[in-house]
Image (cartoon, rainbow, N blue to C red):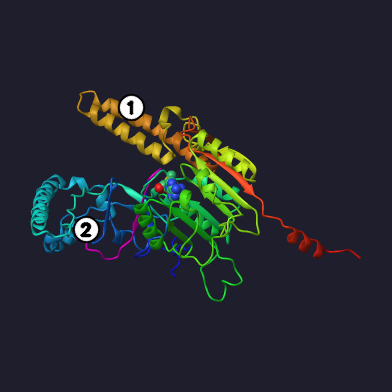
């Protein structure tokens, strides 16, 4: 079993690795890096974003966290690839070129790309019509959209449950990090735990739970000494099951997560392929009617999915208070204890240190926005030069320029003095720490109901306990 990229991050980005492109705050994109791929681009595999195009060749072999500039990417389809290859030398721009790429006749290029796109679409449509006429099953090759010259940048990050939650393809509402981190902690989920989860939905909680229980992979020498963690996950919507199953496989998590296609409210938590019931230490239900599934979570039924020798910790995630009432009512009537309800009101705090600029140094009139003395001097010279140029066209120019030069000279001398003072200090440490909060709590996510089912305590358990009780001298 290969190591999951969620638990083992290679030192640098590599081919076939899952990576997360951080486009901007709250905008992440998962990609699988491919060294070679025939995507219809001369550059091989390319990821297109609204911040530009990123050939995978520019993303492989980097330190995680690197900033990558967009590249200008040649467009086309497989049909025109030979021609593209001839042009490749001219078209493969460096990152620097990409940033200024639109200045070099790109309008002309774009026009020709648009024309070729029209050709591509009509070619694909003709092909599709022909296939339909032939009764063929195959879908025609996708037509690539023209790519603008790159102008932005992204950061490349390793996958984590958090970045996966923010970037995954949402098939359902998902549980977000502020909620699942609290839930997993309250459920006491730790390496080696067994947790039941239903419904699996988009697999956001599943990934977080898999990391929490992970205690190594099955292995003949260690599995007897070490309890391996397990997530038993249930989902009754078949397409979601298939998508999540593929993702878990791609992420190397299929030995940790046992995903079962099942309606837990009607059929309970049995796992047909497993030799024994889950024996769960913790349960998390993200279902519309969790109280209907709860009837299967008792110790009395034969083949109970609960760990018989430990207290079981339980949580539901329900958006409506009516759901909470029904769940709590069931829990109270069925021997669950420590019942409580919480709501996570997540609020982002933006903490940063205020910049000590020239304004704070008493140079309000010079250029308060400039970060450094050099920057201020540079801006001052630019402004003054523009003014001088303007006046140079007038008759009075000479006298004025002289006056300006003197002014610049005296301001420059003042700045020079300040530079000497500032350079001897660590300005970045002098700014006040300031904190801004989001003005309001954005949305209500859900109510979290927690409860504990104590382990059963029989006369035999009591007897064994008394017999083993250490007796003093
Ligand atoms: N917790 C998931 C996540 O973080 O991605 C999202 C769960 S989504 C809100 C609820 C899921 O429960 C849906 O995918 C739905 O199909 C599934 N579901 C609803 N009733 C179910 C049942 N009786 N048995 C199994 N799955 C069920």
Residue appearing at x 46%, y 30% in the figure: 363
Q: Picture coordinates of residue 122 (x, y %)?
A: 8, 50
Which of 283 and 168 lies nearest the eye of the viewer?
283
Residue appearing at x 50%, y 40% in the figure: 318
Task: Examine the structure image and report whether residue 235 is included in the region drawn in magenta.
Answer: no
Pointer 1 residue: 403
Residue appearing at x 71%, y 56% in the figure: 457
Residue appearing at x 29%, y 33% in the figure: 385
Pointer 2 residue: 92
User: Label 1, label 2: how many angstroms apart (C-alpha)?
Assistant: 50 Å
Which of 27 and 173 lies nearest the eye of the viewer?
173
Q: Is residue 326 above or below residue 311?
A: above
Count neighbours of disc 2 (C-alpha within 10 A) and say few if under 14, some if 14 to 19, many if 20 or more.
some
Q: Picture coordinates of residue 150 (x, y %)?
A: 25, 49
Label 1 vs 2, first from the N-terminus: 2
For numbered disc 2, what is the local secondary structure? loop
Q: Main secondary structure of the magenta part?
A: loop
Which of 171 and 275 lies nearest the eye of the viewer?
275
Quadrant in the picture for the N terminus: bottom left
Q: Is residue 334 above or below residue 253?
A: above
Instruction: State yes or no: Cβ of the residue under disc 1 lies below 8 Å from any atom of ligand 1.
Output: no
For numbered disc 1, what is the local secondary structure? helix
Q: Residue furthest bottom?
A: 221
Task: Give the magenta range.
Answer: 24-43
Q: Picture coordinates of residue 292 (x, y %)?
A: 50, 45
Q: Is residue 397 left or right of residue 329?
A: left
Q: Is residue 177 left or right of residue 135?
A: right
Q: Is residue 223 above or below residue 262?
A: below
Residue 390: which quarter of the image?
Answer: top left
């Amino acid at each position: 079993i290969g190591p999951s990229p969620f638990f083992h991050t290679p030192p640098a980005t590599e081919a076939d690795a899952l990576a997360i492109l951080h486009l901007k705050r709250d905008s992440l994109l998962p990609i699988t890096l491919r060294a070679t791929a025939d995507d219809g681009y001369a550059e091989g595999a390319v990821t297109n974003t609204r911040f530009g195009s990123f050939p995978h060749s520019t993303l492989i072999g980097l330190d995680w966290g690197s900033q990558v500039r967009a590249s200008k990417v040649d467009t086309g389809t497989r049909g025109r690839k030979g021609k593209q290859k001839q042009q490749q030398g001219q078209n493969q721009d460096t990152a620097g070129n990409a940033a200024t790429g639109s200045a070099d006749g790109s309008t002309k290029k774009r026009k020709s790309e648009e024309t070729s796109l029209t050709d591509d679409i009509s070619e694909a449509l003709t092909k599709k019509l022909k296939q339909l006429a032939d009764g063929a099953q195959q879908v025609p090759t996708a037509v690539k959209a023209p790519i603008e010259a790159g102008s932005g940048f992204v950061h490349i990050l390793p996958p984590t449950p958090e970045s996966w939650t923010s970037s995954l393809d949402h098939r359902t509402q998902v549980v977000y990090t502020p909620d699942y981190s609290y839930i997993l902690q309250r459920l006491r989920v730790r390496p080696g735990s067994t947790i039941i989860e239903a419904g699996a939905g988009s697999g956001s909680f599943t990934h977080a739970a898999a990391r929490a229980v992970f205690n190594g992979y099955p292995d003949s020498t260690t599995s007897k000494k070490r309890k391996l963690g397990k997530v038993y996950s249930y989902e009754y919507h078949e397409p979601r099951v298939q998508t999540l199953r593929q993702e878990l496989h791609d992420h190397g998590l299929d030995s940790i997560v046992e995903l079962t296609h099942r309606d837990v409210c009607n059929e309970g938590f049995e796992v047909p392929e497993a030799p024994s019931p889950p024996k769960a230490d913790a349960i998390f239900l993200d279902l519309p009617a969790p109280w209907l599934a709860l009837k299967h979570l008792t110790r009395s039924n034969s083949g109970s999915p609960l760990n018989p020798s430990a207290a079981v910790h339980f949580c539901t995630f329900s958006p409506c208070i009516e759901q909470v009432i029904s769940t709590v009512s069931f829990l109270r009537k069925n021997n669950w204890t420590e019942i409580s309800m919480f709501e996570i009101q997540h609020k982002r705090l933006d903490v940063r240190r205020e910049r000590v600029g020239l304004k704070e140094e008493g140079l309000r009139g010079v250029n308060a926005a400039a970060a450094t003395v050099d920057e201020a001097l540079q801006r001052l010279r630019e402004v003054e030069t523009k003014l001088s140029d303007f006046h140079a066209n007038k008759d009075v120019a000479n006298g004025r320029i002289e006056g300006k030069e003197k002014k610049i000279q005296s301001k420059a001398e003042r700045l020079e003095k300040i530079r000497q003072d500032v350079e001897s200090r660590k300005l970045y440490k002098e700014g006040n720490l300031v904190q801004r909060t989001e003005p309001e709590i954005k949305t209500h996510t859900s109510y979290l109901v927690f409860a504990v089912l104590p382990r059963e305590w029989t006369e035999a358990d009591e007897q064994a306990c008394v017999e083993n009780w250490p007796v003093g001298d």
